[in-house]
């Protein structure tokens, strides 16, 4: 039987199910090719001169790695000419990037974190790209980058597609167009993504959790309670032993949960309270929440469903608790108690 490539899968979703439009199909294909180019750059490592600091900071005030900058440029260059986009927004840029006038404008908006987990670049640990697609509202003002920001401020429920690429031992593309979650593996010889897993389902229960334990002294009481109960193991109220896994690369941690279950937490704490959280709603929380829910999991801030949040600004930060449904429901209930 012929391999089902990404192009074939998207064609079937368009032709047989009517889930996506032709423009969305082409947009996702272009994003996937950009991810391939990023994968090649990462694979060269020190040979390509792409490791180390870029000597600049992003809008978040974080030091940019050379690969952060390169990945951002690859995604911008790949997507601005295709005619499928009205504008793009990147975690690495203060304002949206408008499609130049010399190119046709499309009906979609693309947001992305070009290289998630970039603090791990120099130590050769899995990192990734996260992206999300929205419909551009009719009549949106795209005259300037400042005016265009309002078009992006849509809740996560408005996403029409989301995905991430994992750059690890193999390069994977994990995707949803609102019809479940599928996984593609990059065949380097063919130069294309091939479908390797359909109907991904996150187990409802788990014995693994991911959290930065160094922040324990800053956590709120519900998280202190939940992590304490997990650490108590079989003798504690949860009645089972847990293992902790923490890669400090959201893509890697979430992909492990997609593969075998677990719960990922970057909760609100006293250190982050003024910022609203650590992770960015538009670039990280919303696309990951969409994927996790499509795979049968749950994603909340501890107090509300992430996909229901009405964004107030492009770089808004939120707490994130996602993964196996029963565990996420437990933590969310602790916040309500």
Image: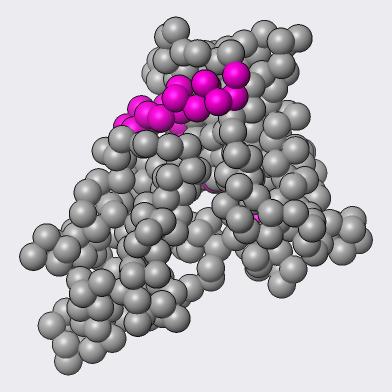
Task: Give the farthest residue toward the bottom.
Answer: 235
Quarter residue 217 falls in: bottom left
Q: Position of residue 73 (x, y in %)?
A: 75, 38
Image height of 225 relative to 132, above or below: below
Q: Position of residue 301 (x, y in %)?
A: 29, 54
Q: Residue at x 50, y 59 (%)?
A: 250
Looking at the rendered image, the quarter that the N terminus falls into is top right
Work out whether residue 201 can be spotted.
no
Q: Is residue 131 magenta?
A: no
Q: Residue at x 45, y 81 (%)?
A: 214
Task: Depth check: give the residue in front, 305 or 164.
Answer: 305
Image height of 303 relative to 197, above or below: below
Image height of 36 relative to 97, above or below: below
Q: Residue at x 73, y 58 (%)?
A: 65
Q: Residue at x 37, y 46 (%)?
A: 289
Task: Depth check: give the residue in front, 245 or 137.
Answer: 137
Task: Give the farthest residue toward the left.
Answer: 337
Q: Is residue 167 magenta?
A: yes
Looking at the rendered image, the quarter that the C terminus falls into is bottom left
Count the marks: 0
> Which residues, given as a range, are shown in magenta?
144-173
Q: Position of residue 34 (x, y in %)?
A: 71, 36
Report the coloring of the rendering: one colour
Work out whether residue 140 can be spotted.
yes
Q: Position of residue 260 (x, y in %)?
A: 40, 63
């Amino acid at each position: 039987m012929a391999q089902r490539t990404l192009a074939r899968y998207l064609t079937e979703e368009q032709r047989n199910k009517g889930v996506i439009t032709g423009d969305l199909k082409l947009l996702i294909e272009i994003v996937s090719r950009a991810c391939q180019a990023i994968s090649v750059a990462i694979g060269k490592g020190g040979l390509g001169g792409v490791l180390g600091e870029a000597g600049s900071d992003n809008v978040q005030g974080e030091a940019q790695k050379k690969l952060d900058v390169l990945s951002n440029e690859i995604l911008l260059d790949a997507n601005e000419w295709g005619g499928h986009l009205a504008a793009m927004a990147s975690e690495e840029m203060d304002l949206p990037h408008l499609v130049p006038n010399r190119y046709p404008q499309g009906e979609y908006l693309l947001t992305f974190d070009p290289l998630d987990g970039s603090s791990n670049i120099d130590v050769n640990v899995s990192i990734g790209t996260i992206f999300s697609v929205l419909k551009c509202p009719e009549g949106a003002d795209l005259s300037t980058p400042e005016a265009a920001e309002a078009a992006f401020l849509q809740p996560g429920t408005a996403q029409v597609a989301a995905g991430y690429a994992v750059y690890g031992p193999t390069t994977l593309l994990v995707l949803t167009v609102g019809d479940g979650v599928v996984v593609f593996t990059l065949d380097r010889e063919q130069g294309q993504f091939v479908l390797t897993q359909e109907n991904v389902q996150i187990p409802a229960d788990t014995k693994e959790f991911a959290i930065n334990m160094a922040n324990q002294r800053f956590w709120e009481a519900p998280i202190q309670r939940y992590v304490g109960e997990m650490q108590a193991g079989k003798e504690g109220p949860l009645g089972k032993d847990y293992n902790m896994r923490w890669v400090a690369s959201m893509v890697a941690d979430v992909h492990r949960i997609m593969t075998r279950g677990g719960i990922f937490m970057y909760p609100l704490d006293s250190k982050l309270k003024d910022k609203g959280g650590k992770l960015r709603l538009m670039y990280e929380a919303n696309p990951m929440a969409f994927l996790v829910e499509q795979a049968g999991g749950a994603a909340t801030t501890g107090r509300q469903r992430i996909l229901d949040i009405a964004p107030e600004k492009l770089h808004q930060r939120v707490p994130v608790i996602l993964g196996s449904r029963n565990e996420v429901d437990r933590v969310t209930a602790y916040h309500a108690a």
